[in-house]
Image (cartoon, rainbow, N blue to C red):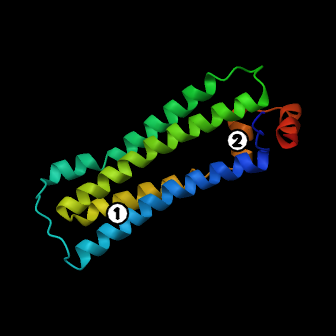
């Protein structure tokens, strides 16, 4: 008995669900922390020096650079002659790595915000989450990223 392979529509819907679930987690965490601190339901106890706060603002930049570098590295490893399913599986892996690396700085900024209450940190986290939103998977982006020719695109939609 073999397991049925998903069609492209299901595959792509899975990518979108994954993206929005990760984004939703970031936004939910932002909301919870902001609510707790705004209504003084928790006490912040850490007083971070200003230079440390400015250094933490580099986290999203590092996440952006690192995620793009690894994403492109993963894509370069996909053989040109690979079957379309293999390419899509590798693409999904590359996206998961990209999303994980993009999500890390946002979560770290939110934890630091929760610990010290500095508004600049939540602003940076929201900007990082906005960038994460812009990384939403698209069919056009997938075709461009994988450099699919007309025949491969046809195969992809016929899966």
Callout 1: few (<14), some (14-19), or many (20+) C-alpha neighbours within 10 Å? Answer: some
| Left or right: 96 as drawn, with respect to 84 | left
**In-image side of 91 versus 22 (left or right):** right
**Judging from the image, what secondary structure is the residue with disc 2 in?**
helix
- Who comes first in sequence, dot 1 or dot 2? 1
**Does the rendering let one see residue 72?**
yes
Q: Considering depth in this image, is 77 or 68 the residue closer to the camera? A: 77
Cα gap from disc 1 to disc 2, whole angstroms: 30 Å
| Quadrant in the picture for residue 20 | bottom right
Residue 46 drawn at (x, y percent): 11, 58
Is label 1 or label 2 in front?
A: 2
SS class of the residue under badge 1? helix
Say which of 31 and 117 sits in front.
31
Q: Quick one: quadrant of the N terminus?
A: top right
Q: Residue at x 88, y 41 (%)?
A: 158
Spot occupied by residue 13 in the image (x, y as percentages of width and height): 69, 53
Q: Residue at x 45, y 45 (%)?
A: 102
Residue at 30 percent of width and 54 percent of height: 109
Residue 82 is labelled as none
> Would you name the residue on which mark 1 appears?
123
Q: Residue at x 21, y 64 (%)?
A: 118
Rendered position, 141 above or below 121: above
Residue 3 location (% of width, % of height): 75, 37
| Residue tagged 2 | 142
């Amino acid at each position: 008995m073999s397991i049925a392979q998903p069609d492209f529509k299901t595959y792509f819907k899975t990518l979108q669900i994954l993206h929005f679930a990760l984004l939703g987690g970031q936004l939910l965490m932002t909301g919870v922390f902001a609510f707790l601190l705004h209504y003084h339901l928790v006490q912040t106890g850490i007083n971070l020096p200003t230079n440390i706060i400015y250094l933490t603002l580099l986290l999203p930049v590092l996440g952006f650079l690192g995620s793009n570098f690894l994403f492109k590295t993963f894509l370069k490893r996909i053989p040109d002659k690979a079957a379309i399913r293999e390419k899509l599986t590798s693409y999904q892996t590359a996206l998961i790595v990209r999303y994980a690396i993009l999500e890390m700085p946002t979560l770290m900024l939110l934890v630091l915000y929760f610990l010290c209450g500095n508004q600049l940190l939540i602003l940076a986290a929201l900007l990082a989450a906005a960038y994460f939103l812009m990384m939403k998977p698209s069919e056009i982006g997938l075709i461009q990223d994988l450099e699919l020719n007309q025949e491969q695109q046809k195969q992809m939609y016929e899966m």
